[in-house]
Image (tube, grey):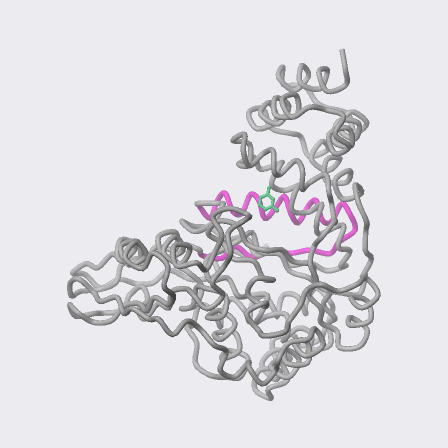
Amino acid sequence: MSVVQEAIETKKLGGELSASTIEAVVLGYTRGEIPDYQMAALLMAIRLVGMSYDETLALTSVMANSGPRYSFPDCVDKHSTGGVGDKVTLTALPLVAACGAPVAKLSGRGLGITGGTIDKLESIPGWTADLSEERFRAQVERIGLVVGGAGELAPADKVIYALRDTTGTVDSLALIGSSIVSKKAATGSGHLLYDVKAGSGAFMKTPAAARELAELLVRLSASLGIKASALVTDMDAALGSAIGNALEVRESVAFLRGEPVPADLAEVATDVAVRLLELHGVSDPAGSVRRALDSGAGYEKFAEFVAAQGGDVDALVDLPVSSSVRVVSAPAGGFVGAFDALGVAQGALELGAGRQTKEDTLDLGAGVELLVRVGDEVSAGDPVARLYGTRSVDRATALVLGALTIGPDPVTPTPHVLDRL
Ligand code: URA
């Protein structure tokens, strides 16, 4: 029997895989020596039976070591498990960098309902994530904030994730945890904050499931020498009011420039920044973040970072979005009970703000702007959202309206930060 056949038999019967078996299978699959059907059988057995903590840690280590590894022990980083309108990287990280904690971040493009940070930043004319390792390192040293493309990090995770995505094996706590932490360990930042989203627009649908994942991420990180903590934040509703690449950069710039933004965005961005400064050992983290906002130092850091990566800073104050705008109106009067993140994201996807397949081209100026929030009172005919873009506008309108629940009774909005670890 081959090593992968033995692993399938062991896991099928509820046994535990040794670290050496996990290494042989993962590296064998990454080199193309193990066929998809055997790896898929093993992943399904893992999905159904689960993995012990030791197995999960072994899988995380071997995937982290399967490609290049960076080392930025003094740097901080954050990871979001993916949300709708999630612009915490664009808002919290400039604040953190402005407060003296350097940030070295490797990011990806979006697929499905959650947008990628690189797609968002590419809506700034000239901005690029295509940096050599030398330039990436030099920018950390010089301005303390860099965002590059994740490229070849953790290649084993890349091929295994692609297989999981098509074989019904994504939704496994051990596989999700090892996948996320392997990439973070390969990036090499010494301090890490996980923002685990819970709700309709997130992987984890309940706060309890999100907490379980958060605990695993923090534990795996600690085992690999990374100082980590986590927040569980709400994703039943989109974060802030903007969903779409240029729209989200505009809202982030507004926050950093001290202009009014929805309270949930301000709260989560500030909370993440404070937690990162705590992890880094900065004294008075809350006061530091407040001063970076009040003085404009957070915005100045963002502008410095944009310029360093070729972006047009002058464009930031009025970043272009699609000039084709449709206003969606409330079908009835009452109180907004929900503006479901998943439905709104599907509307934005139809408009071209996201990719349904890797080959899709984005409309960076497309998306949805929410004009009401949970708890607001509206009259029939009041504007509730603006849709930007020219693709599938009727379908997007139906999806956004379908996401809106209006009822006769007043509604108390839920907190935005649901749990802290
Ligand atoms: N995000 C990842 O990076 N990996 C998973 O398995 C799920 C979400």
Residue at (62%, 38%) from the top-left corner?
A: 161
The front one of 382 and 52 is: 382
Quadrant for the C terminus in the image: bottom right
Left or right for 50, reference 192: left
Q: Over which residues does the magenta segment extend?
A: 206-234
Q: Is residue 209 magenta?
A: yes
Query: Which residue is drawn at the image coordinates 22% and 64% (left, top)?
Result: 335
Where is 217 relative to 283, above or below? above
Tag count: 0
The front one of 184 and 156 is 156
Q: Residue at x 31, y 59 (%)?
A: 393
Query: Within the image, what quadrant is residue 413 found in?
Result: bottom left
- Residue 144 position in % (x across, y down): 75, 73
Q: Residue furthest top?
A: 1
Q: Is residue 235 above or below residue 41?
A: below
Residue nearest the viewer, comparing 250 with 191? 250
Q: Position of residue 285 (x, y in %)?
A: 65, 74
Q: Residue 304 location, x and y as percent?
A: 68, 80
Q: Nearer the viewer, residue 46 or 160?
A: 160
Q: Quadrant of residue 369?
A: bottom left
Q: Identify whether 385 is placed above or below 357.
A: below
Q: Is residue 36 visible?
A: yes
Q: In the image, is residue 343 above or below residue 167?
A: below
Residue 275 highlighted magenta (yes or no): no
Residue 230 visible to the viewer:
no
Quadrant assignment for ligand 1: top right
**Considering the image in quadrants, where does the N terminus appear?**
top right
Name the residue: 73% across, 60% down. Answer: 191
Q: Position of residue 100 (x, y in %)?
A: 73, 76
